[in-house]
Image: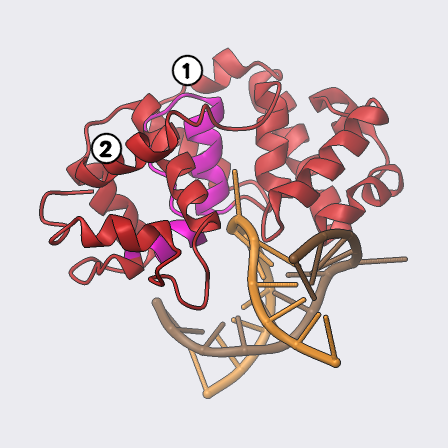
Chain colours: A red, B orange, C brown
Amino acid sequence: MVIYSALLGRYGDRHWWPAETPFEMMIGAILTQNVSWKNASLAISALRGADLLGPAALADAPPGRVSPLLKPARFMNLKAGRIRSFSEWYSREFDSDLQKMSACETNDLRRRLLGVDGIGKETADCILLYACGKPVFVVDAYTRRVFGRLGLTEVAPDYGGLQYFFMKNLPSDVGLYRDYHAQIVQLAKETCRRRPLCGECPLRRLSSGLRCLSAGP
DNA sequence: ACCCAGGGCGTTG
DNA sequence: CAACGCCATGGG
């Protein structure tokens, strides 16, 4: 909570995730895999322009129609299959109804999401947190980088270990988890990759104000 | 001409 | 399990 307070003071509430609708958010989570958000959002715009940004449209559209639109998001054929799989699953399992989906118990829903082709831990957790409003902390490359640099040593560096570290030390609060992840992304983007603790990096100022992580994240 | 982006999956050792 | 390689890209 100490670190979050510092970040909040610096950046203010980020109001994340950048999407107009929950379905768009979920598709975006798949499209942004290993690609900058900038490029992923280009693909979203292309889908919207083709009037394909909906569960039924995406589930029915022929792959050859979708893939070219995903070009800027990289791995277009792969991702065309993934957003199709997800759309079919969302239509079939929940009748394309976010309320029905969100009514599921969190861990059960997470298992089911992980069963969809192309949805791994991070993507599943993003969907759970930002679309379904489940209190699940999202771990991504930025999180690993930032907290690795802050000297996180006694925590298992894998996904589950890091996630547990946050969820154990923070109150279970959807708004907090949402904004915290957004803060981490913002911080990481302003931090140079090569020398993350150089004088220019906000991460340096942040870490110098902290003795250790004993007070929690 | 590099290097890298808000991963996931299948295949090896 | 880790460590790779792979996936029809675009910007710095």
Measured as percent of width and height from the top left, residue A28 is found at 62, 35
For the residue pair A168 and A20, the one nearer the viewer reads as A20
Secondary structure of the residue carrying tag 1 is loop
Residue A20 vertical position relative to residue A83 in the rendered view, above or below: above
Q: Which residue is mark 2?
A: A5
Pick whichever of labels 2 and 1 is earlier in the sequence: 2
Q: Quadrant of the C terminus of chain A?
A: top left
Q: Which mark is residue A133?
A: none
Residue at (63%, 25%) from the top-left corner? A24
The prevailing secondary structure element of the residues shown in magenta is helix
Badge 2 amino acid: Ser
Residue farthest front in this picture: A199
Residue at (40%, 45%) from the top-left corner? A187
Measured as percent of width and height from the top left, residue A179 is found at 37, 29
Q: Nearer the viewer, mark 2 or mark 1?
A: 2
Residue A191 vertical position relative to residue A89 in the rendered view, above or below: below
Secondary structure of the residue carrying tag 2 is helix
Q: Is residue A114 left or right of residue A68?
A: left
For the residue pair B7 and A16, the one nearer the viewer reads as A16
For the residue pair A145 and A11, the one nearer the viewer reads as A11
Q: Which residue is mark 1?
A: A103
Measured as percent of width and height from the top left, residue A118 is found at 59, 47
Q: Is residue A183 left or right of residue A37?
A: left
